[in-house]
């Protein structure tokens, strides 16, 4: 009995320690980046992966493609006041839904869109589970697909623009972010492959890591960067075989533009690739000025 009591006490102590750490395991991880986090900001440092842990759902969808409007409702413990992050913070809907911030709709017709207009107001009546004080976002965008009610909605940019908007609203700060392209097959019709993964136009590079997953043919080299700084993340690498990697660890200012998003690019040298694929992860921080 004493041994059993000791084991029970030990198990309870371990459970209490885990609970004290506030471990969160959000179910959505855009771009394959782990999003577990317990605090979305510390002082004036805003951690973008935490801003990607909100989730909403389509309350009323679009019956046609093209420029259409859908209504999105928040979900979580603070659904009546905003979009709930994994640390329990409720973000105002205007931080999440605006014309700078892409959103992903995840159903049978998965896609990421950037709103062309957003209206935030009281949710329409007549929907099960929607309280009288709950706020919804009516989002207009150009959709390639239709989306029905209950489709999951979450960040389309790994939380970057959400963090930038929030930082600007509270006086400015530094936004740290990290993105992962996944494996991208190279465009054989040009020197540049434009990925669907985006980063701020201006940032201080903190690091990057890329790997050739399928041998690149015909081209002289490959690099990872953004428009205007095509080798900003990984300098030109002349080794083209599968398994080749490049890393960047030096801090460097990339771009001189705004905090708007721009695509991560894979750029070849001298001639178009005949074949090949690359996977890259890029991380850095972006300074944000006060917006109000």
Image: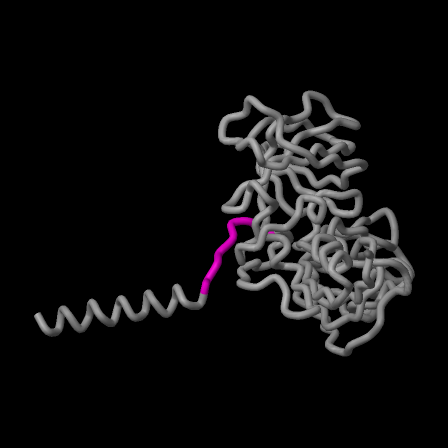
Q: Position of residue 18 (x, y in %)?
A: 39, 66
Identify which residue is drawn at 88% across, 50% down. 190
Quadrant hosting residue 213: bottom right
> Residue 166 versus residue 145: which sits nearer the camera?
166
Asked if the stretch drawn in magenta spans residue 23, the answer is: yes
Q: Position of residue 289 (x, y in %)?
A: 82, 63
Q: Is residue 229 left or right of residue 64?
A: right
Q: Evaluate whether residue 117 shows in this view.
A: yes
Q: Position of residue 256 (x, y in %)?
A: 90, 65
Q: Can you say which quadrant of the picture contains the C terminus?
A: bottom right
- Residue at the front extreme of this rendering: 133
Quadrant hosting residue 120: top right
Residue 176 against residue 25 in the figure, above or below: below
Q: Main secondary structure of the magenta part?
A: loop
Asked if the stretch drawn in magenta spans residue 258, the answer is: no
Residue 63 against residue 130 in the figure, above or below: above
Q: Is residue 225 left or right of residue 122?
A: right
Identify which residue is drawn at 73% across, 60% down. 170
Identify which residue is drawn at 66% across, 70% down. 43
Q: Can you say which quadrant of the picture contains the N terminus?
A: bottom left
Please state the extent of the stretch shown in magenta in the rendering: 22-29
Identify which residue is drawn at 60% across, 55% down. 32
Q: Position of residue 3 (x, y in %)?
A: 13, 73
């Amino acid at each position: 009995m004493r041994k059993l009591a000791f084991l029970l006490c030990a198990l309870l102590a371990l459970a209490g320690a885990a609970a004290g750490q506030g471990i969160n395991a959000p179910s959505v991880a855009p771009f394959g980046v782990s999003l577990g986090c317990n605090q979305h900001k510390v002082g004036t440092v805003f951690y973008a992966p935490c801003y990607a842990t909100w989730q909403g759902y389509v309350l009323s969808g679009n019956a046609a493609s093209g420029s259409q409007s859908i209504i999105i409702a928040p979900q979580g413990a603070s659904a009546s006041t905003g979009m709930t992050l994994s640390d329990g913070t409720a973000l105002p809907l205007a931080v999440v839904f605006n014309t700078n911030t892409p959103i992903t709709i995840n159903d049978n017709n998965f896609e990421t869109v950037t709103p062309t207009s957003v209206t935030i107001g009281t949710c329409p009546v007549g929907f099960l589970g929607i309280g009288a004080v709950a706020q919804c976002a009516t989002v207009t965008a150009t959709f390639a697909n239709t989306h029905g009610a209950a489709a999951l909605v979450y960040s389309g940019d790994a939380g970057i623009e959400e963090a930038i908007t929030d930082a600007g609203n509270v006086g400015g700060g530094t936004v740290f972010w990290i993105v992962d392209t996944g494996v991208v097959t190279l465009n054989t019709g040009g020197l540049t492959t434009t990925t669907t993964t985006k980063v701020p136009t201006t940032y201080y590079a903190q690091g990057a890591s890329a790997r050739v997953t399928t041998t690149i043919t015909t081209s002289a080299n490959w690099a990872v960067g953004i428009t205007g700084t095509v080798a900003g993340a990984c300098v030109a690498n002349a080794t083209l075989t599968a398994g080749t990697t490049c890393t960047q660890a030096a801090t460097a200012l990339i771009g001189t533009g705004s905090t708007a998003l721009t695509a991560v690019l894979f750029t070849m040298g001298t001639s178009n690739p005949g074949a090949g694929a690359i996977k890259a992860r890029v991380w850095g921080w972006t300074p944000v000025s006060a917006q109000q």
